[in-house]
Image (cartoon, helix red, strand yellow):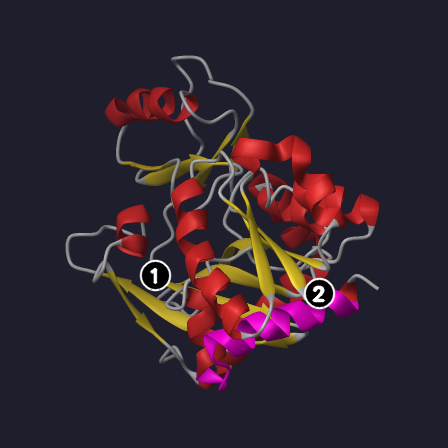
């Protein structure tokens, strides 16, 4: 097939997108496809014209545009098939405060939160005790994220984050370890337990992308009952948001045995060593086989 590989864009996660696209490009060539690279940052106005000349679009954008459903909606308008979720599910899942409402409505456990549509007044205080997290309502890769330990750091963190983000959410610190679980088709994959390296307080951007920044254990060494619950919640969240193809749900697993669903990613990282490809490898799918599966699912979902 002639495949249009869409990556780059203009979000804060641009470099993550471009790095992942390199491996996807090579895999597509190994699978026998012809590939045209398309970067919306340089030529968004030409997307429809380019898509019309291709059989399929493979989207590897992070943040907006891409995870917000904009590119998906454009492709849908001309009937160009693509991998992953369609525009409505993508739009819902990118907005953390919205997804949390969907989670609660479907009986999925998620931490409490406060939504900040604008910079609050200087005397504003969150309803949660310190330490807490303030993060972008629509960002990813742990960019636009701040751990706040006291009133003294609150104003500085808000100023810093609102300088680049239009909306934020505030969440209490949930003690525990990070667990992530991918969904491929209608099957939940083996979860991964994430242990940030010494010196990293949490799984931040540096821990995610610096070699040795975190220890990622797959399958996660969790009790069987917890593994089953993680997979159940990941699949239920995928379905509740109306997603298709693939997704990845992120959790905190607390010492008391409770699980807390943080968010769902509709375009998870896709380097060969990213989290979802690791989970696919655990069930016998090579990176190339995973790419082929996503194309197959995309062709089926877009009929």
Percent position (x, y) of residue 53? 73, 51
Percent position (x, y) of residue 287? 47, 74
Measure how far apart labels 1 and 2 are at the Cα level: 36 Å
Nearest to N terminus: mark 1 or mark 2: 1
Tell me which residue sits at (41%, 62%) in the image: 271
Question: In this rendering, which labeled residue sits more in front, label 1 or label 2?
Answer: 2
Percent position (x, y) of residue 64? 56, 37
Tell me which residue sits at (56%, 43%) in the image: 96
Looking at the figure, which quarter contains the C terminus? bottom right
Q: Depth check: 183 or 169 in front?
A: 183
- List the single residue furthest toward the left: 199
Q: Depth check: 243 or 260 in front?
A: 243
Left/right placement of residue 73 relative to residue 43 reads right
Can you say whether 68 is above or below 215 in the image?
A: above
Query: What is the magenta segment's predominant secondary structure?
Result: helix
Disc 1: which residue? 176
Q: Depth check: 45 or 263 in front?
A: 45
- List the single residue furthest toward the top: 122
Q: Which mark is residue 298?
A: 2
Crowd band around label 1 with a 10 angstrom C-alpha radius: few (<14), some (14–19), many (20+): some
| Label 2: which secondary element | helix
Q: Can residue 233 be seen in this view?
A: no
Using the rendered view, name the quadrant where residue 133 is placed: top left
**Count of labels in the image:** 2
Query: Is 108 a magenta residue?
Result: no
Q: Can residue 139 be seen in this view?
A: yes
Tell me which residue sits at (64%, 61%) in the image: 237
Q: What stretch is highlighted in magenta?
A: 282-300
Crowd band around label 2 with a 10 angstrom C-alpha radius: few (<14), some (14–19), many (20+): many
| Label 1: which secondary element | loop
């Amino acid at each position: 097939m002639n495949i249009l590989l869409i990556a780059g864009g203009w979000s804060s996660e641009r470099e993550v997108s471009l790095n992942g696209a390199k491996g996807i490009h090579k895999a597509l060539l190994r699978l026998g496809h012809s590939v045209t690279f398309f970067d919306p940052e340089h030529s968004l106005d030409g997307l429809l014209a380019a898509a019309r000349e291709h059989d399929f679009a493979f989207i590897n954008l992070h943040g907006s545009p891409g995870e917000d459903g904009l590119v998906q909606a454009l492709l849908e308008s001309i009937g160009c098939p693509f991998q992953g979720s369609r525009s409505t599910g993508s739009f819902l899942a990118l907005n953390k405060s919205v997804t949390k409402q969907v989670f609660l409505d479907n009986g999925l456990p998620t931490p409490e939160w406060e939504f900040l549509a604008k910079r609050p007044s200087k005397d504003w205080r969150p309803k949660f005790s310190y330490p807490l997290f303030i993060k972008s309502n629509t960002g990813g890769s742990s960019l636009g994220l701040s751990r706040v330990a006291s009133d003294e750091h609150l104003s500085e963190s808000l100023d810093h984050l609102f300088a680049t983000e239009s909306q934020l959410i505030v969440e209490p610190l949930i003690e525990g370890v990070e667990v992530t679980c991918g969904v491929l088709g209608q099957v939940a994959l083996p979860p991964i337990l994430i242990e940030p390296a010494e010196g990293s307080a949490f799984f931040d951007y540096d821990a995610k992308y610096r070699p040795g920044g975190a220890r990622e254990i797959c399958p996660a060494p969790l009790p069987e009952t917890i593994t089953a619950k993680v997979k159940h919640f990941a699949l239920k969240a995928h379905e509740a948001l109306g997603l298709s193809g693939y997704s990845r749900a992120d959790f905190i697993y607390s010492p008391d045995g409770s699980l807390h669903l943080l968010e769902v990613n509709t375009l998870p990282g896709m380097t060969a060593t990213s989290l979802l490809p690791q989970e696919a490898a655990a069930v016998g799918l090579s990176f190339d086989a995973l790419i082929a599966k996503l194309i197959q699912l995309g062709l089926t979902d877009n009929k």
